[in-house]
Image: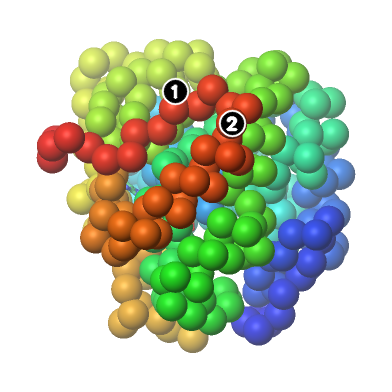
Amino acid sequence: MSRLDVTETFHSITFPGHLHTQDSLNYATNFKFQDTDTVIVTYPKSGTTWMQEILSLVLSKGDPTIAQTQPNWARAPWLEQYYSPDVLNASKGPRIITTHLPYRLLAPALKQSKAKVIYVARNLKDVSVSYYHFHNVAKFLPDQGTFSEFLNAFLEGSVHYGSWFDHVKGWTSHSKDIQNFLYVTYEEMWQDLHGALQKVSRFLQCPLTEDELIRAQKHCSFNSMKENAMVNYTLIPQEIMDHSKGKFMRKGKVGDWKNIFTEEQSFLVDDVYSSQMADSSLKFLWECPAEI
Ligand code: PPS
């Protein structure tokens, strides 16, 4: 399935046709979740791959074998992507499922079960920068233009996967409607990975000893994941991702937006953020005071 230039529009949101079809999107929204499923939900570039790795390592009690031998899309497939029925049908035992779908599209199916949901959010300035760079590398994403053009489209919500605001507000404002919901931010994982691993292991009711936690932490650090071909996307052929244009595991920082945003762009985002998030109590860390 190549379809690099195809865009699928589903419920007014656009998706890359390389990975999605109307059938695959319908499959996701009508999916029969099981109570034993754990679902990672993110807006793109918010720490999806990191949480996939954290879950793999918590469930294996810090043993990196699976994380180092199975690609992330095989152990935690994106529900809405075309290959997921094959992966999920072949899966034995508790499933880890990933999705970028907004709440309004997935909630009807999800609410039929007690599946555990982990929502990972990241501050939108860093998301926009990470997403912009990824458009350079991923040939299945449209031409992104200049950063300023991309930022306007991102704030309008006309980029693939829709609006960051709708995604974050949709999932977090309805968290009480989902029986088992955990909210984690990229920034808290960055500041305290050990604490984030403990939080996830408690949520999954999968206790780890201190040694197991330390082992898990080592294997889901940025430097380990950067070298792990099962998560750094170097397995994807050059025709699909142009690895000469950048790396999937790019910088892994909090506050990288400061290296690309102009002062004007930062004010613009602050303005849009305050009006769009006026009814939300979420707090984001926009930069880290010092390197950790
Ligand atoms: S995707 O395409 O939606 O699945 O991307 P996603 O995995 O959500 O986000 C990619 C960004 O997450 C960074 N990343 C990490 N940062 C710190 N530590 C670890 N372990 C880690 N793993 C992934 C990755 O580098 C991308 O961020 P940027 O800012 O582009 O570096």
Q: Amino acid at mark 1?
A: Val
Q: Which mark is residue 83?
A: none
Instruction: Look at mark 2 in the image and give the residue it sits on.
Output: 278
Determine the image quadrant of residue 217: top left
Indicate if the residue with disc 1 has its beta carbon within 8 Å of ligand 1: no
What's the residue at 36%, 18% (across, down)?
Answer: 198
Which residue is situated farthest in the left direction here? Answer: 291
Decide: is 188 above or below 147. above
Decide: is 85 above or below 211. below
In-image side of 109 versus 17 (left or right): right
Q: Residues within 10 Å of mark 1 (few under 14, many from 20)?
A: many
State the CA–CA distance, disc 1 to disc 2.
29 Å
Q: Position of residue 89 (x, y in %)?
A: 73, 48
Q: Nearer the viewer, mark 1 or mark 2?
A: 2
What's the residue at 42%, 71% (across, down)?
Answer: 147
Instruction: Look at mark 1 in the image and give the residue it sits on.
Output: 200
Determine the image quadrant of residue 20: bottom right
Q: Position of residue 224 (x, y in %)?
A: 23, 49
What's the residue at 71%, 54% (across, down)?
Answer: 80
Q: Secondary structure at mark 1?
A: helix
Total marks placed? 2
Q: Secondary structure at mark 2?
A: loop
